[in-house]
Image: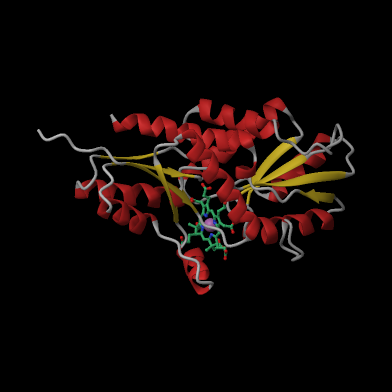
Amino acid sequence: MYAITMKRGILLAAFGSGSSQGESTLRRFDAQVRKAFPDVSVRWAFTSMLMRERLASERKKSDSVHKALKKMAFEKFTHVAVQPVHVIPGLEYGDIVSDADELRADGTFASLVVGAPLLTESQASVDRAARALLAELPSGRAPGEPVLFMGHGSRHAAESRYEALAAAVRERDPLVLMGTLNGTIRLEHIVEHLRASGRPFDRVWLLPLLAVVGRHTLEDMAGDSEHSWRSRLEAEGIACVPVLRGMMEYQGFMDIWVGNLAQAMKGWG
Ligand SMILES: C[C@@]1(CC(=O)O)c2cc3[nH]c(cc4nc(cc5[nH]c(cc(n2)[C@H]1CCC(=O)O)[C@@](C)(CC(=O)O)[C@@H]5CCC(=O)O)C(CC(=O)O)=C4CCC(=O)O)c(CCC(=O)O)c3CC(=O)O
Ligand SMILES: [Co+2]
């Protein structure tokens, strides 16, 4: 058996971002990954075709997961770990796994592994994320002020992960609530819950449960349109303090995604 010279690579996979804040968030994460694995090449893939096209029109190059893996195969990488920076094992995450499955079937890599998203079916992953989230609540939050997190939500069964996280967080702090844009726990459920608590509060803090600040945060959460969470809460007479920081800007969450990557790399054998 000839000895293959091991060439190891990491492929980080995000939805993609074109904003300067989003790009600096991804760059900070990139630096943390390179620091954690100094002798492994780090590449990026953006999963959103829409984002890749938007960047291409601004002459910024970006690869899909499939294309990035093809390039790494061409460059003779033997061991590759793909690490998504997604929150749930939903549809977007599933696309990444199927891209990896396809390339693995090619047999071009000696080993191709995919890391877990922030939340998996394990309660340990939910509790770990709940602790990271509660460790980073806005410093200006006065006692008794509710904090609302807006997740993306999904029609995929992985939607249950948001509910699991919401329960784990509420257990630790009953005034930290979570809902999703396109999921089962909607904003109206959160408002009902707040009203039912009977506790007086002047304002609520509004944070994205999204890795990177993008349109969903800027428009759907904090935007001026009447459909945004902020506008709908203000229409209910509830003042809002939006915090435009993606989850990947918090050390605790970066540590979880880096930890998932380290775990996946153990699968290289
Ligand atoms: C399946 C689908 C919905 C459906 O059809 O059910 C879906 C699902 C999910 N998206 C997620 C994440 C993000 N989606 C966006 C943005 C957009 N998402 C859109 C479409 C779709 N998104 C449908 C697939 C359409 C397709 O792929 O062809 C766009 C194009 C249209 C729209 O939704 O408005 C809009 C472009 C906005 C623009 O114009 O820029 C951003 C960026 C941002 O915030 O703006 C993030 C990263 C947030 C972050 O950084 O965390 C997650 C959570 C993943 C996770 O973290 O786990 C899920 C759930 C899951 O994966 O199951
Ligand atoms: Co989306």
Viewer-closest of 164 and 9 = 9
User: Of all residues shown, which one is farthest toward the bottom?
Assistant: 57
| Residue 240 seen from this side | yes
Q: Is residue 138 left or right of residue 105?
A: right
Q: Is residue 116 above or below residue 66?
A: above
Q: Work out which quarter of the rendered image holds the C terminus and state it.
A: top left
Q: Work out which quarter of the rendered image holds the N terminus and state it.
A: top left
Give the percent coordinates (x, y) of residue 8: 33, 40
| Residue 211 seen from this side | no
Q: Is residue 50 left or right of residue 235?
A: left
Give the percent coordinates (x, y) of residue 108: 21, 48
Give the percent coordinates (x, y) of residue 239: 86, 51
Q: Tell me what residue is drawn at x 38 percent, y 54 percent.
A: 65
Viewer-closest of 137 and 69 = 69
Q: Tell me what residue is drawn at x 40 percent, y 59 percent.
A: 64
Q: Is residue 213 left or right of residue 175?
A: left
Viewer-closest of 3 and 68 = 3
Q: Tell me what residue is drawn at x 35 percent, y 29 percent.
A: 266
